[in-house]
Image (cartoon, helix red, strand yellow):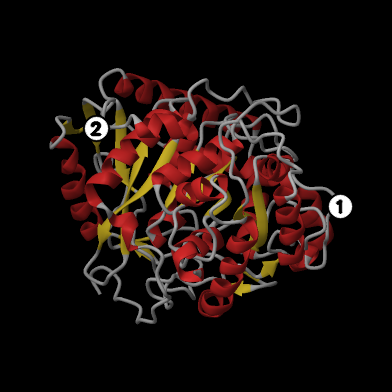
């Protein structure tokens, strides 16, 4: 019974919960057994809250806490993981930092409250880099999270724990956040799906930089219908977040069902943006081949891209200001407990001038206009989901991409960050494996606030590949493949 439940999709589990064929307690028991069997090899869910989860389950089964039962996104008692950057009342929340190693919040993050109101049951906190900064999931509190396809490799970051928990069947849905690819790159590395929603689609609640659109909260799942279901649970206006707006009249789950009938007509694809972005050659070849699947249902697929300019530098300038807002005071008080990458990013931000900030904003606007013009001609823009496959778990970032040495830990982020800077929704969806068995994925980017369009295109592609049916997996040991050209 436990194995059968683990292999259910979230959408299937929700249907069985509604029909009273299973109970939330059944799912919690199955998840607990799976975590006990799997997590020792991957370290995805370092903090469990099973007693709290069972109390919530019993309340649902007694007819309580069901006021949202008839709303879109009702989960009905599905266990979920919450990234260890969002507070869960009464549950240890560390942000991956030794500064908060023993912190237990009294109140939940507004998004956690929303997920629980929609029938999601929090069973665990998922591992993350310190304060979510980094493309590999490790911290001084809980250690490293490993990729289940090859435990010698990274799962990516910063929603690495959530991606691994999904791939190994420890949970059905995982919450995450995304600034420069933190929902999309771990999804790519672990062969699951992740969505960076449009800014304002999902509440950020307690964030210090509430008026910036760069960092968002969002869903991760094993397949696109589940991803849409979880987005429906998250979406909507929130008094705690001034950028939010009301949930759509047509639920995202319903939009995904209509994916074939509303298939895209014109698709732009690029891997290198005309040579502006370094890219692993095999990753590029796999993605260029797989994107052609859209031609079967009648779409035109063409090489096209917006001119990038100096967008990477603009991103680093603007991202650094986030770190000043979030970490300046903390750096003054706890410098010895903060990892070097965060110190570097914060101090870089403190050195920026007003003129440099203005330049970065102008550069972002110029790029957005280029994206706007591209979307006048194409329904979506598709790129690889990551510039390089999963690398050594002991490294904080790949040493090089496409033979080019990286200058800093964010050096491979622009393939995801361009969508961040343009305010676009973006979905990572699996598209295959490289010669060493490492997952490769596509990154589907739609115009701002066209989250449904991004999900529909991803759903259509997923149906053509069937790669979601490979999950869940048991963690697999392996060796670190040689670097490209090595």
Q: Quadrant of residue 254?
A: top left
| 212, 127: nearer the viewer | 127
365 lies above or below 480: above
| Image spot of residue 274 (x, y percent) | 24, 39
Residue 377, position as x, y percentages in the image: 25, 20
Q: Which residue is mark 2?
A: 268
**Direction from residue 229 to residue 437 in the image, left or right:** left
Q: Residue at x 68, y 29 (%)?
A: 211
| Residue 483, numbered circle | none
Residue occupying the point 26% across, 24% down: 378
For disc 1, the neighbor class at 10 Å (few under 14, some 14 to 19, many from 20) is few
Q: Earlier in the sequence, mark 2 or mark 1?
A: 1
Q: Nearer the viewer, residue 435 or 15?
A: 15
Say which quadrant the C terminus sits in: bottom left
For label 2, count other residues whose C-alpha is less than 10 Å away and answer few (under 14), some (14-19) or many (20+).
Answer: many
Q: Position of residue 439 (x, y in %)?
A: 32, 62
As rendered, which of 255 and 202 lies closer to the eye? Answer: 255
Residue 202: image quadrant is top right
Q: Is residue 304 above or below residue 87?
A: above
- What secondary structure is found at the residue carrying circle 1? loop
Q: State the SS at label 2.
A: strand
Residue 351 visible (yes or no): no
Please tell me whether residue 242 is drawn above or below residue 460 in the rendered image: above
> Which label sits in the foreground, 2 or 1?
1
Q: Is residue 286 left or right of residue 404?
A: left
C-alpha separation, residue under disc 2 versus residue under disc 1: 47 Å
Residue beneath label 1, please? 106
């Amino acid at each position: 019974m436990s194995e059968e439940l683990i292999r259910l999709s979230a959408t299937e589990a929700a249907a069985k919960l509604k029909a009273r064929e299973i109970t939330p307690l059944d799912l919690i028991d199955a998840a607990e057994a799976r975590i006990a069997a799997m997590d020792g090899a991957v370290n995805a869910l370092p903090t469990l809250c099973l007693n709290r989860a069972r109390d919530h389950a019993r309340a649902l089964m007694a007819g309580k806490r069901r006021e949202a039962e008839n709303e879109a996104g009702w989960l009905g008692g599905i266990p979920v993981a919450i990234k260890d950057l969002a507070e869960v009342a009464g549950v240890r929340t560390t942000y991956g930092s030794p500064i908060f190693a023993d912190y237990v919040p009294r109140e939940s993050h507004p998004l956690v409250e929303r997920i629980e109101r929609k029938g999601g049951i929090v069973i665990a906190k998922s591992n993350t880099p310190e304060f979510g900064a980094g493309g590999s999931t490790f911290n001084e509190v809980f250690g490293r999270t490993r990729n289940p396809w090859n435990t010698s490799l990274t799962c990516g970051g910063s929603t690495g724990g959530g991606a691994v928990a999904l791939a190994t069947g420890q949970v059905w849905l995982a919450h995450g956040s995304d600034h420069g690819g933190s929902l999309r790159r771990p999804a790519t590395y672990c062969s699951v799906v992740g969505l960076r929603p449009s800014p304002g689609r999902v509440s950020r609640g307690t964030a210090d930089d509430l008026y910036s659109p760069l960092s968002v909260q969002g869903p991760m799942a094993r397949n696109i219908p589940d991803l849409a279901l979880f987005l429906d649970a998250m979406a909507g206006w929130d008094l705690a977040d001034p950028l939010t707006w009301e949930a759509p009249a047509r639920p995202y789950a319903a939009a995904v069902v209509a994916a074939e009938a509303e298939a895209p007509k014109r698709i732009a694809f690029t891997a290198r943006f005309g040579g502006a972005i370094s890219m692993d050659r095999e990753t590029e070849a796999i993605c260029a081949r797989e994107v052609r699947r859209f031609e079967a249902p009648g779409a035109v697929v063409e090489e096209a891209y917006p001119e990038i300019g100096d967008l990477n530098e603009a991103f680093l300038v603007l991202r650094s200001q986030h770190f000043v807002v979030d970490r300046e005071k903390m750096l003054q008080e706890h410098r010895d407990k903060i990892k070097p990458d965060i110190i570097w990013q914060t101090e870089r931000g403190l050195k920026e001038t007003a003129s440099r900030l203005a330049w970065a904003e102008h550069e972002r606007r110029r790029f957005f206009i280029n994206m706007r013009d591209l979307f006048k001609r194409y329904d979506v823009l598709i790129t690889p989901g990551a510039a390089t496959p999963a690398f050594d778990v002991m490294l904080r970032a790949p040493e090089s991409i496409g033979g080019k040495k990286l200058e800093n830990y964010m050096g491979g982020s622009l393939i995801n960050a361009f969508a961040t800077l343009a305010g676009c929704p973006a979905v990572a969806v699996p598209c295959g494996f490289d010669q060493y068995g490492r997952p490769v994925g596509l990154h589907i980017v739609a115009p701002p606030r066209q989250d449904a369009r991004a999900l529909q295109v991803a759903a259509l592609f997923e149906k053509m590949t069937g790669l979601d049916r490979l999950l869940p997996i048991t963690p697999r040991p392996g060796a670190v493949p040689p670097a490209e050209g090595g």
